[in-house]
Amino acid sequence: MHPHLRGWVDVQRTHQANVRLGLTLAFVAGATNAGGFLAVGQYTSHMTGVVSAVADQMVLGHWTLAAAGVGSLLAFVLGAMTTAWLVNWGLRHSLHSAFGLPLLLEAVALLLFGLFGAAIAVLAALFLPLTVVLLCYIMGLQNAVITKISKAEIRTTHLTGLVTDLGIELGKLLYVNRHPGHTPVRANRDKLRLQARLVASFFAGAVLGALGFKYLGYVSTLPLAALLLLLVWRPVLADLVRRRPHSA
């Protein structure tokens, strides 16, 4: 194991650790979102489309579909709420794994999604709506983790904000300063690099996630779960050992 992996989710944070974790989670989000679309026919990482779809379905009188959209939105919100609960509980109990607990739960959810994919395929009418809700919950869970860790500097499950910031910094970078009497426009090159890397990581994850689901099916989510477990097991194990009652 990489000697610094434990620090990626430890409560003692560095900017470098935040960036590494953000890139990893962007990859996982891209893979889950793209693979999930092939599984359930719906993207689950961004709520803009979900809310718009709810409005459309209400206007068209498709109340069942509108209710399903509301369920997806609530699942995303519940995922973010769960992260807040777990992180604050972990911090109150001085756990090294406070930030890792939501990722541990996400790994378990991805394991369930991968292992029970066959049942989803056979009983699609029953399990498909539940699968959409589960994926939205996972996305809310994950996005809230890195948002809380990085103090909203990094988000990983949707690209609208990232691409907007990328465009702003590119605009500054290419701006021609022709007025010596004014403060020159300068791009934040560190932020520009970070946004570009996050977008690239999400895209790489999306490509591999789509390829994985196309050729392997639901089990393609198992490596994603394993990656998250790799990040969190050291802090979790350290907390378990620290809190184990000493034998007499």
Image (cartoon, helix red, strand yellow):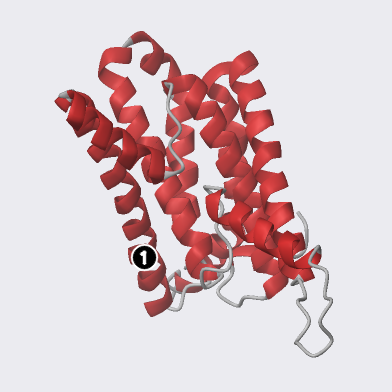
State the residue in front, 241 or 1. 1
The residue pinned by badge 1 equals 84
Does residue 117 lie above or below 147 as drawn? Answer: above
- The x, y position of residue 10, in whole percent, is 59, 70
Q: Which residue is drawn at 68% across and 67% down?
A: 17
Can residue 21 be seen here? The reply is no
Q: Quadrant of the C terminus?
A: bottom left
Residue 22 at x, y percent in the picture? 63, 58
- Residue 161 in percent (x, y) is at 54, 56
175 or 210: which is nearer to us?
Answer: 175
Tell me residue 8's x, y (percent).
Answer: 65, 64
The quarter holding residue 116 reads top left
> Which secondary structure, mark 1?
helix
Q: Based on the displayed image, in which of its 4 quarters is residue 128 positioned?
A: top left
Instruction: Say left or right for 88 vs 45.
Output: left
Left or right position of 53 against 14: left
In the figure, is residue 99 to the left or right of 214? left
Find residue 67 and report its image quarter: top left
Tell me how many marks there are.
1
Q: Going 72% across and 45% down the picture, which residue do you hit?
A: 200
Residue at position x 31%, y 42% in the image: 51
Q: How crowded is mark 1: few (under 14 residues within 10 Å), some or many (20 or more)?
A: some
- In the picture shown, does residue 161 fall above or below 176? above
Identify which residue, 159 or 81, lies in the foreground. 159
Residue type at tag 1: Ala
